[in-house]
Image (cartoon, rainbow, N blue to C red):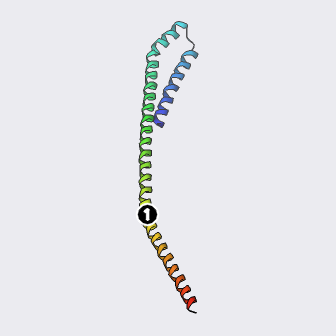
């Protein structure tokens, strides 16, 4: 896009320079009108070049916007998949921790029962 901006600047600068040269040159009205008529094709070419550059820039922005949307959709899908995989990975650990907690509770209950039995015997 920098090249297009540079080219656009060159075209606009050329047009402004040509207009300034025509308007400041010491010539009669008839000569000035002839020079303007002769440079009409140059002005039309510059205008068409500017129009083409503007269309190219518009297409580039549209393409980048579309690509950006696609990348965001892909990224969102990847994040969602990663979260789902993480949830599945921790599910087995969660179940294992719950099983261990039950075993610990059972062991504590057995120890309490043994302590009560020992107190009752003494």
Foreground residue, 116 or 100? 116
Q: In this view, does 105 lie above or below 92?
A: below
SS under mark 1: helix
Residue at coordinates 49% horizontally, 73% vertically from top-left? 101
Question: Vertically, is 97 above or below 85?
Answer: below
Quadrant housing the C terminus: bottom right
Relative image position of residue 120 (x, y in whole percent): 57, 89
Classed neighbour count for the residue bearing mark 1: other residues with Cα under 10 Å, few (<14), some (14–19), many (≥20): few
Q: Residue at point 44% right, 41% down?
A: 69
Q: Where is residue 13 in the image (x, y as percent from the top left)?
A: 52, 26
- Name which residue lies at 52% across and 6% down: 30
Q: Which of 63 and 83 is in front in this view?
A: 83
Which of 62/104 is in front? 104
Measured from the top left, where is residue 105 in percent x and y? Answer: 51, 75
Residue 27 location, quadrant: top right
Image coordinates of residue 46 in percent, x first then y, are 46, 22
Q: Extreme top residue here?
A: 30
Q: Pointer 1: what residue?
A: 91
Q: In this view, does 81 lie above or below 8?
A: below
């Amino acid at each position: 896009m920098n090249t297009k901006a540079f080219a656009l600047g060159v075209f606009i600068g050329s047009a402004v320079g040509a207009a300034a040269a025509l308007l400041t040159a010491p010539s009669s009205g008839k000569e000035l009108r002839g020079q303007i008529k002769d440079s009409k094709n140059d002005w039309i070419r510059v205008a068409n070049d500017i129009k083409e550059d503007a269309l190219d820039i518009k297409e580039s922005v549209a393409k980048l916007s579309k690509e950006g949307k696609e990348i965001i959709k892909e990224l969102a899908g990847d994040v969602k998949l990663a979260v789902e995989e993480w949830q599945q990975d921790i599910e087995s650990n969660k179940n294992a921790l719950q099983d261990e907690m039950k075993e610990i509770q059972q062991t504590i209950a057995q120890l309490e029962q043994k302590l009560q039995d020992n107190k009752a015997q003494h």
